[in-house]
Amino acid sequence: MAGVEEHLESADYLQKRQLKSGSAGWLLLAGLGVSYVVSGDYSGWNFGLAQGGFGGLAIAAVIIAGMYLALVLGMAELSSALPAAGGGYTFARRALGPWGGFATGTAILIEYSIAPAAIATFIGAYVESLGLFGITNGWWVYLAAYALFIGIHLSGVGEALKVMFVITAIALLGLLVFAIAAVGHFDLSNLTNIAVDGGAAGASALLPHGYLGIWAAIPFAIWFFLAIEGVPLAAEETANPERNVPRGIIAGMGVLLVTCATVLILTTGAGGAEEMSASGNPLVEALGQGTAAKLVNYIGLAGLIASFFSIIYAYSRQLFALSRAGYLPKALSVTNARKAPTLALIIPGIIGFLLSLTGKGDLLLNMAVFGAAVSYVLMMTSHIVLRIREPEMPRPYRTPGGAITTGIALVIAVFAVIATFLVNPVAAGLCLAVFAVFMLYFAVYSRHRLVANSPDEEFAVLAAAEDALK
């Protein structure tokens, strides 16, 4: 099959690689979706102000919000039809074959392995600004965060999702407190206080770096929504996933649209575009001194922790699925007594911690966005291919607008991939090199050792069998 070799593993093999089913309903999944992303409201997005000014970032945010809405609607359909722990890899495996499936899974793994490292640097900035424990060097914070939250995940998914839900609720409360306080600091002139680059095409007070600034701001606008697509990774641990995964991801996206608009406008208007463009904790600095700023600082830490905590979950499930199916070393998918994939949690955590030691949150953010945007291109292609090739495939949820909707997301995602090279060609180039190494590993080694009876591969095998009978 497409130059790959598959074989059956024993029942014992799969028994050692089981997740705990029925642990989540749609509300927990919506919380998971918001949890993945909410740190992006507290920090990271504001670096886009330096690229495009308020106008450039605002336009980029509108474009990206449209892309993510279309993406989420497409993934809601795919997750209802193919509910498995592989998420985007499972969808692409069915539509694009093992090469496309592994490419998608690799891009997602790059995104989810690097994003926590970026968030860890932002957590460090918040801790240092609070003066907690006398810490002035962030690496202690990075190490503690990885050790503590990987430990919680090792205790089991039910416990982890409940902790995550509570932390996310606190983070949303913090955004509400911020919004109420920021209204009193809002000044319309703050939105356009970045000096205009007279040499840039289309430069103005609203677009200080011209039209190209809109494009350059796209990777930072993505930070408002990055990782919402990880909700389907919980499919095997969800009750009635065909119904609950689509409901959860769409509900989570609705919340994020509101928080994106609120944070972008109020933070910039209260603190100033120039001042916020390089801030490690923009919401706090926008409020200045006072009780509200202090409260948002503490709660903002909860928001960063929520995303850090939940994306650890996401990378472990993606790595688990790829390993269980034989694309990556099979030892990575063995689960412990609490049905948590031990090495799939620990190894990317070690890599992420080492990356966080660079302290370059904006650089790591761009690298995570590269992986995300590549995966979006492949997942939306998968939706379109399956709509054309398998129109009769059971779909409990169907995307409004069908392939047109996901086609829009596909086009924007292509531009987003290119934008990561505009922002930092070295960072994007490094991610491309890592991606190539993974694909080389598949070409030389793992494509000859795929597991035919893993759930994700069975979806594809079933489809091939049905085609043969036609």
Image (cartoon, rainbow, N blue to C red):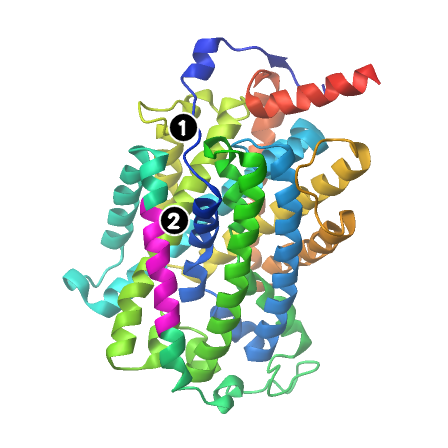
Q: What residue is drawn where x is 34% and y is 67%?
A: 174
Q: Are marks 2 and 1 in contact (CB under 8 Å)?
A: no
Which picture quadrant has residue 88?
A: top right
Q: Is residue 437 left or right of residue 147?
A: right
431 versus 13 height, above or below: below
Q: Farthest residue in the right direction?
A: 470
The quadrant the N terminus occupies is: top right
The image position of residue 348, as x and y in percent, is: 40, 38
Taken as a whole, is the magenta stretch helix, strand or loop? helix
Badge 1: how crowded within 10 Å, few (<14), some, or many (20+)? some
> In 3D space, how far apart are the residues under numbered discs 2 and 1 (Cα atoms)?
31 Å
Mark 1 residue type: Lys
177 versus 10 height, above or below: below
Which picture quadrant has residue 290?
A: bottom left
Q: Is residue 120 visible?
A: no
Mark 2 residue type: Leu
Q: Is residue 396 left or right of residue 190?
A: right
Toward the viewer: 252 or 283?
A: 252
The residue that disc 1 covers is: 20
Specify start and end residues of the magenta stretch as a single range: 163-177
Q: What residue is drawn where x is 72% and y is 51%?
A: 400
Q: Is residue 39 left or right of residue 323?
A: left
The image position of residue 210, as x and y in percent, is: 65, 79
Badge 2: how crowded within 10 Å, few (<14), some, or many (20+)? many
Q: What residue is drawn where x is 19% and y is 61%?
A: 135
The residue that disc 2 covers is: 355
The quadrant the C terminus occupies is: top right
Q: Is residue 160 visible?
A: yes
Mark with earlier residue (2, 1): 1
